[in-house]
Image (cartoon, rainbow, N blue to C red):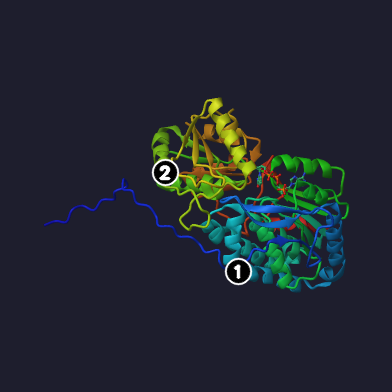
Amino acid sequence: MPSPAVQLNFSTTWSYAPAPESAAHVKVAPRYELFIDNRFTPPAEGGYFDTINPATEKKLSEVARATAADVDKAVAAARRAYEGPWSRLAPNERGKYVYRIARMIQDRARELAVIESMDGGKPIRESRDVDVPLAAAHFFYYAGWADKLDYAFPNRSPKPLGVCGQIIPWNFPLLMAAWKLAPALATGNTVVLKPAETTPLTAMKLAEIIQDADLPPGVVNILTGAGDSGAAIVNHPGIDKIAFTGSTEVGKLIQKSLASSRKKLTLELGGKAANIVFADAPIDQAVEGIINGIFFNQGHVCCAGSRLLVQESIAEMVLRKLKDRMRTLIVGDPLDKNTDVGAINSKPQLEKIQQYLKIGGEEGADLWCTECDLPQRGYWCRPTLFLNCSQSHRVVQDEIFGPVLAVQTFRTVEEAIEKANNTPYGLSGGVWTDKGSKIFKVSSQLRAGVLWANTYNKFDPASPFGGYKESGMGREGGLHGLLPYLSLN
Ligand code: NDP
């Protein structure tokens, strides 16, 4: 007798058994001090603030709040190190320190991943498989450049700038620290780094690594604190270069305050990328790309594909498949290995997203979200679509920085390009099509620094990253990422 046809039945109530990552091996101290001159140092006057787990709202630790007096101390330490041991070191020896940091990140990868998920809310699968390995890869990559700068810029006598102030956001705390520190150190600069207020813990673990790696005192100084600590770094006269990643609003403030100074500046700011799906695209693959584009890291990604532009003739099918796929997304405990969408990073960020959910509805877009259960405590947002959006809607124009996708349709290639470019931002974009020629036509006309074709959110330390327009200036990653840290004669 012939065996019955095998069929996949999607309408069962299958669910995954919990697969929690253990946090038992992780040591989080009750309090962290500032890291200045390779020593953990109490703040001069700023006191301490709590850092919490956004999935449970429970306090994890408290960290020091740096004020102008601490910034002064850290800049002085960085200057001593720059003019002392660090500048006397042979470039290949400098490279060895950077390699050492890379290897120590790998050694402590599991611990760093767990802390990143606890402090920031991102799923452990992402911190384990993306954030931490990429952070190590950045240090490895730039370590290799340390003794090859004369070959990278032949006949240009590359020289370090001096003391760099670096300010990073909360969406990829360890990875952004790596993006900033690795090229600065490889090129011979010293650093004062400020992590974001809500995610200081992996930066403090990185401070332990730097101490264990035996870097000369003062080469890396890490100051925790809030926006005013960042502003004190930006405005300190002893700093030669500022590298900032964060909101366009704060980026503009920084640019204004440095306008009359000699400090070099790079800004990596917001985005509102269009993910463009043409009728000839591999549809199931594109649906995965749309999901990855907007729901990776709860949408707290500057290059997120937060606008979907789908060709009208396939819109109905794509949206049906997209909704089906969204219904399978597991929202919840960041430390569970099954979780796809973790906690929103902070209460203010959740409130901002909720405000946009209201604005989108009031402006006339149709809100659709999944019906998944959410945990009782913590900050959560269901994966959400805004359908039937117009170009003028704020949910199409503004960076929401959450798991919210604005959907629009188009008929022609020209219309897709025009809509994609109709934004103050210019950081990234995606193109989905079967035709290579269309990829070239569209990507050459999109005003965005990073473009992916038939994929999304792929990162590599060798590849430059950065934006046009209000998405910032300067590039990080690759050979281009060395330039902001060097003067070339
Ligand atoms: P911010 O731009 O305020 O924060 C980024 C970093 O800058 C943090 O370390 C912050 O410190 C610091 N900072 C804040 N004010 C100043 C200042 N005046 N001078 C120097 N440094 C400063 O982003 P938010 O955390 O407030 O997030 C707000 C919005 O910004 C988000 O909703 C999102 O839309 C966008 N954003 C975009 C990012 C991107 O990569 N494109 C990253 C983060 C946010 P602290 O956090 O301690 O206050």
- Above-or-below relation of 420 to 172: above
The tag on residue 313 is none
* Quadrant observed for ligand 1 in the rendered image: top right
Q: Is mark 1 within 8 Å of ligand 1?
A: no
Depth order, front residue of 379/228: 379
Tell me where residue 136 appears, x and y as whole percent.
62, 65
Q: Residue at x 43, y 41 (%)?
A: 322
Q: Position of residue 30 (x, y in %)?
A: 68, 61
Which residue type does callout 1 highlight?
Gln
Residue 330 locus on image (x, y percent): 45, 49
SS at mark 1 in the image: helix
Crowd class of label 2 (few under 14; some 14 to 19; many from 20; radius 10 Å): some
Residue count near mark 1 (Cα–Cα under 10 Å), binned few <14, some 14–19, many ≥20 = some
Q: Secondary structure at mark 2?
A: helix
Q: Is residue 32 something one can see in this rendering?
A: yes
- Looking at numbered disc 2 in the image, what kind of residue is underneath it? Arg
| Quarter of the image that includes the C terminus | bottom right
Q: Tag on residue 327?
A: 2
355 left or right, relative to 2: right
Count of labels shown?
Answer: 2
Task: Please tell me which residue is depicted at 48% across the width and 60% down the height of the picture.
Answer: 20
Residue at (84% x, 54% y) in the render: 45
Q: Is residue 474 above or below residue 470?
A: below
Whether residue 453 is visible to the viewer of this picture, yes or no, is: no
> Residue 28's image quarter?
bottom right
- Dot 1 corresponds to which residue? 106
